[in-house]
Image (cartoon, helix red, strand yellow):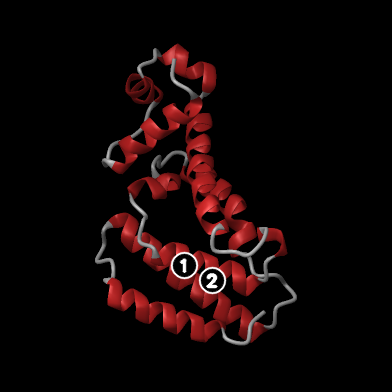
Amino acid sequence: MSSKAEILDGALAMIQAGGSVSLESAAKRAGLTKPGLMYHFPTKEALMLALVDHVVDGWERRLTSFLEGPVGEASPAARMAAYLEWALAGDADLSDLVMFADPRLCERLTAHWVERMRPWLAVPEDVGPSERARLTAVRLMADGLWFADAMGNLPPGDETRSEIRGLARSMMEGIR
């Protein structure tokens, strides 16, 4: 019998290959019957939410490697710098866009993704307007890199990534 992680990895591989995920296709990929899969994920929504969590869990492991301590103790600039470095790595693929993988569940999946990523991407209310705008601009730059890589939509080369890093870091100068 496949473990939850193996089921999720298989479903993400289907998304990465440009396919769609259903309870039936995920079960087949995992070598299970549909009822066997439903033991772990009773609905398509449960499976898709678990996929979002599985992807974000992986991101968080990587993002944390760019911090000196726990995310809750990191400054907004340190969190945004970690997100930028993660995006600059260029490791994203279609499976990183799992929240868009099912049009009927997109709103729920995206809301779940936002909540999971809030500790990394939210700028606290006590940050001044100029700093807020600069941190948000860096986040949007990183979002664009992530999306370009995931979609294969003209992702920038290494030299351009290096220049983007410099621009983003200069935008964050003086922000704690």
Q: Is residue 126 above or below residue 67?
A: below
Give the image quarter of residue 152: bottom left
* Mark 1 residue type: Glu
Expressed as whole percent of the image width and height from the top left, the position of residue 174 reads 62, 87
Q: Distance between the residues labelled 2 and 1?
A: 6 Å
- Residue that carries the numbered disc 1 in the rendered image: 85
Secondary element under disc 2, as helix, strand or loop, is helix
Q: Do the residues labelled 2 and 1 touch (CB within 8 Å)?
A: yes
User: At which x and y percent is residue 79?
Assistant: 60, 67
Seen in the picture, residue 73 relative to 59 is either above or below; the reply is below
Q: Label 2, on which residue?
A: 81
The quarter of the displayed image where residue 57 is located: top right
Residue type, mark 2 in image:
Ala
Q: Can residue 42 be seen in this view?
A: no
Q: In this view, does 62 lie to the left or right of 158?
A: right
**Image coords of residue 69 (percent x, y):** 66, 61
**Crowd band around label 2 with a 10 angstrom C-alpha radius: few (<14), some (14–19), many (20+):** many
- In percent of width and height, residue 65 lies at 54, 58
